[in-house]
Structure formats: C-alpha cells, structure tokens
Image (tube, rainbow, N blue to C red):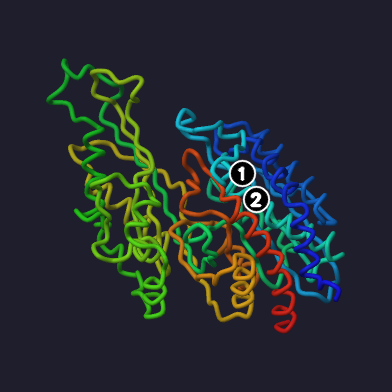
Amino acid sequence: MPAGPVESALAHYEKNHAIYLDELKRLVRIPSVSFAGFPEVEVGRSADAVAELLRRRGFTSVEILRVDGAHPYVFGERIEDPSLPTLLLYAHHDVQPAGEVEQWRSPPFDPTERDGRLFGRGTADDKAGILVHAAATDAWVRGAHGTPLNLKIVVEGEEEIGSEHLTSFIGRYRSKLDADAMVLTDTGNVDVGVPSVTVALRGLVVVEVEVRALDQSVHSGMWGGPIPDPVLALSKMLATLVDDDGRIAIPGIYDRVRPLSDEQRRAIAALPVTREGFRAQARMRPGVRLLGGDRHPLEVNWWEPALAVNAIQASSRRDARNIINDVAWARVGVRLVPDMDPADVKERLVAALRRAAPWGVEVSFKIDTAGAPWITDVSHPAFPAAFRALERGFGRPALAIGCGGSIGFVEPFARALGGVPALLVGVEDPLSNAHSENESLSLADFQKAIRSAIHLYGELAGALRRRT
C-alpha cells in the first residue's frame, strides 16, 4: 500500500535529519546579537544565511525586509494553490549576548553536542525554531512533492530587544502577511519530552532608574557621613517594591489581576512538574525558599505579575575602591498577566520609586519596554489540530500551558491579522538556559518538534479548510 503524504514527508525527514542539524549549527555560529554595542553586520549576515536556508528548503519567494532603524526581517512564502488555507510561521534569528563567557563550558558560538544536547547561544532561542519550520517545509516539498497548505514565514531580527520596530514593520508590510492561522516556534515545553502549547504570555514593562547625589564620585573617608550615598538610596527605593514574600508591594498593582478559573486550577494540578522538580529546573541553591506560599510555583509564574531587578550598577567589581559613587542605576522589569495595562503599570512603578527616593537625591527614568500580556481562546479548530500533531510527534499527549515570559510579536500580529489563531509551540525546555550561559537544546525534542510540525501542516490543512 503506497505511503500517504504525511508518511512520505516524515520518511524524507528521517533520511535527512542530520543535514537539518548541521544547518542549525551553521546559523548558531553567526553571533547575531541584536543589542546596541554589538556588530550590526553579524545580524545582517544572519539574515542573509536565513534567507538562503529558506530558499533551499522549499520557499519559492524569499526576501529581506527592512524598516528604518531596525535589524533585518526575513520573509518567505510558498503558495501551492491560492484556494488553500495559508499558515504564517514565525521565528527570530537574533540572539542574546553571550553573558559571562568564562562560565560557558564550550564557546557560545561554537555549537557543541554534549549529553544529548546542543550547546550554544541561539541553539534553543530561537534558531532551532527557524529549522523546525524549514525542515518541516522541506520534508513536505521533497518527500510529498508539495505542502498541503500555503506557507508564509517571518523571521525577525530584533525580538531579543523587544521588537522595537514591530509597529512600523506591520504598517509597511501588512499586505504580505494575510493568513488563516499563525504558528510561532519561540516558546518551550513544561519539561523535557512533554509537548506543550502556550496559551498565555505575560507582558513586560521595563524601566531604567538613575539616582544622583554628586557631580562626581568622592573619597568615602573624607566625605562619608554627611554625603548621601546614591547606591544606598537606590537600594532603599528598590526594597520598597516587594514585601517579605517577594510579592509586589506597589499600591494598586493587583487590581486588574483576574482570579484563576477552575479549568486553570485543574490544569495546574495535572502538571508533571512538582515543587521540588521546579527547584531543580531553576537550579535553586539549597536553603533558598520558593516564594508564593504553598501554591504551585508555575501558578505564580504564569498567572501573577512579578518584579525583577535585571541589572544594577554603580561602580564595578573591577573598579571597586573607597568612594561614594556619584550615580547608581538599575533596570527594573515587571511581568504582567492578562487584563493588566502596561501604561498603568509603568506609571505605578515610576511613582512608587519616586515616592521612595530618600534624602532629596535626583531621580530620572527611562522607559525601555511596555508590552501587553496575551491570552488566547482555544475553541478554534486549529488548537485540537495542534494537540493531535504534537501527540503524534512526541508520542504523548500535549499540555496547554501558560508562560512567564513575553513575546512582543504575538499580540500585535494576531490583532493586525484580525484575531487569527496563534499556535505557540517551541523547542525550549527548563534545562535550555535561554538568555543565560550554557544555553542548550534537547536534540531528542528538536527531532520530535520537527516531526510534530510535519503532522501539524497536515492537520491544519484540514482544520482550516473546513473553517474557511
């Protein structure tokens, strides 16, 4: 009996999976850090490499799209038949800085296989996501002689710096983006080997605060005592932002936080991750307690706001000396859950810091990010199709999960496309260490994610055709 198209696509993938892994390694070797101060040419080189990859892997039209001031986007499409449904795929090719290079066990931009994982910056976040789309498309094109629906793909170049020019990008290129559903491979699974569909993301407000008391740093012996220390002032200000259990203490911050539904509580109770398992995943030190009382830590992570001091600076460990510093600076981030308004949170955070400033020190602020949270309705037929595809690819039922992180692309794009379903699936897991040193990708889950994507295209072809 001849194999069906899905089986033919899967067979092609199995014969060529080593090639796709090599292509991932090729992308990881490009240090496409989008942050200011890093070579912009490398992000451009990364975009060129992604464009060439997509051309080789079945996208018939590929171009690099530019917006003034932004790192390049890559856009590709494969239109099999205008009467078929269209799927918009998303990933990003920019990466975080390497961080503390001496803490890496292997060079961050030299992809290295070890213990069933591929180590390197961008292996999981999010260059593996690019290869999931490219490999699944190639498997259908070469194995089954065509895709079961039309495909478009956007690979962003500035996701890691907050998608700063996304509104401009959508405004300029909206006519290219029409689709019946979106698939975004920039999220993760709740555990290694456990397929997951993310149905909610936290938003993010980031504020930089700077405290000054002097025109320049002065000798701490000659001037210490009567002179206010800006570092102590900033420390006192930051300490007022949370209570003894780490809960945000800014007045009114929880006013719009919706209570958990019975369905959400059941989903949390059914998770395979225990409190101790969560501690191990996070690599918590012995004796450090989890915050949030007796509640499951993922309930706190997914469905409550959180505050973190991402960076703080006065002098440095290298330059430490006996001085009163003239200035102290910190970057403060607040993660938002559904119904919270970024503008309201920003105003409350700035007001709380300003109120807490002691001794008449000068305080100034810069708003870095103000992104809204996102939550989706899973009643659309695309979601059961995604759960079926993931179960076939991973060999176990998939879970609907929340996510403590933020993806600035999702909410604006879903809104611009008229509220089409957005399926958030990915290849990260709690051991991936995204944004930190020794980022890595589970090679087994990478293969399962590609198999799932092959199934997903077939499943969505039917689900979206019935809908349209």
**Labelled pair 2, 1 in contact (Cβ < 8 Å):** yes
Q: CA distance from mark 2 to mark 1?
A: 7 Å
Q: Is residue 312 above or below residue 12?
A: above
The circle drawn on residue 156 is 2
- Residue at image point 56% right, 34% down: 108
Percent coordinates x, y for residue 246 in the rendering: 25, 54
Residue lying farthest left? 225
According to the picture, the residue beneath numbered tag 1 turns out to be 94
Percent coordinates x, y for residue 275 in the rendering: 32, 60
- Residue at image point 33% right, 24% down: 317
The circle drawn on residue 310 is none
- Residue at image point 17% right, 19% down: 223
Residue 100 appears anywhere in the view: yes
Percent coordinates x, y for residue 79 in the rendering: 83, 65
Q: Give 95 or 367, whichever is nearer the viewer.
A: 95
Percent coordinates x, y for residue 434 in the rendering: 50, 47
**Which of the 4 image quadrants contains residue 297?**
bottom left
Residue 420 appears anywhere in the view: no
